Image (tube, rainbow, N blue to C red):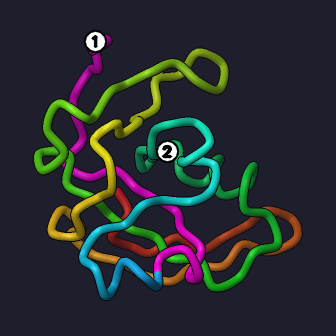
Amino acid sequence: MPDVPSLPLLIYKVASSASYAPARLSGHYAGMPVDAADGYMHFSTAAQLAGTLRRHFRDEADLVLLAVRTADLGPGLVWEPSRGGELFPHYYGGPLDLRAVAWEETVSVDAAGECSLPEAVR
């Protein structure tokens, strides 16, 4: 794993309500279509989250924001360069066990890419 200055306690997954609905019943989230296509689950840190929402979820309502405990992800969590070489958390451990989710909240992103993040994002 590349040198991550300090491993955050939480990382964040943005999901569409439709993709997340089956996970509520099964207890495991398989991810968004882009996750399946790339072979890993995309996450963001608190500092990266607004940029992720602006870039990939513009003008989308009814999204689910999952706060996931990094300690629960084990060796499947890998930090890899992405936008501008910045290290992003990627999860190669298969479907996400929902027991790793500390909390979830719905969010919406407006046409300009703006979103009010929950106060708990830090």
Amino acid marked by disc 1: Asp
Residue 93 magenta-drawn?
A: no
Q: Residue at x 53, y 22 (%)?
A: 86
Q: How many marks?
A: 2
User: Where is residue 47 shown, x and y percent of the image?
Assistant: 47, 44
Q: Residue at x 48, y 59 (%)?
A: 31
User: Where is residue 117 shown, x and y percent of the image?
Assistant: 52, 70
Pick whichever, 36 or 101, lies toward us: 36
Pick whichever, 83 or 26, lies toward us: 26
Q: Which residues are magenta?
A: 1-20
Q: Which residue is mark 1?
A: 3
Q: Residue lying furthest top in this view?
A: 2
Q: Which residue is mark 2?
A: 42
Q: Residue at x 63, y 56 (%)?
A: 33
Residue 5 magenta-drawn?
A: yes
User: Where is residue 116 shown, x and y percent of the image?
Assistant: 60, 74
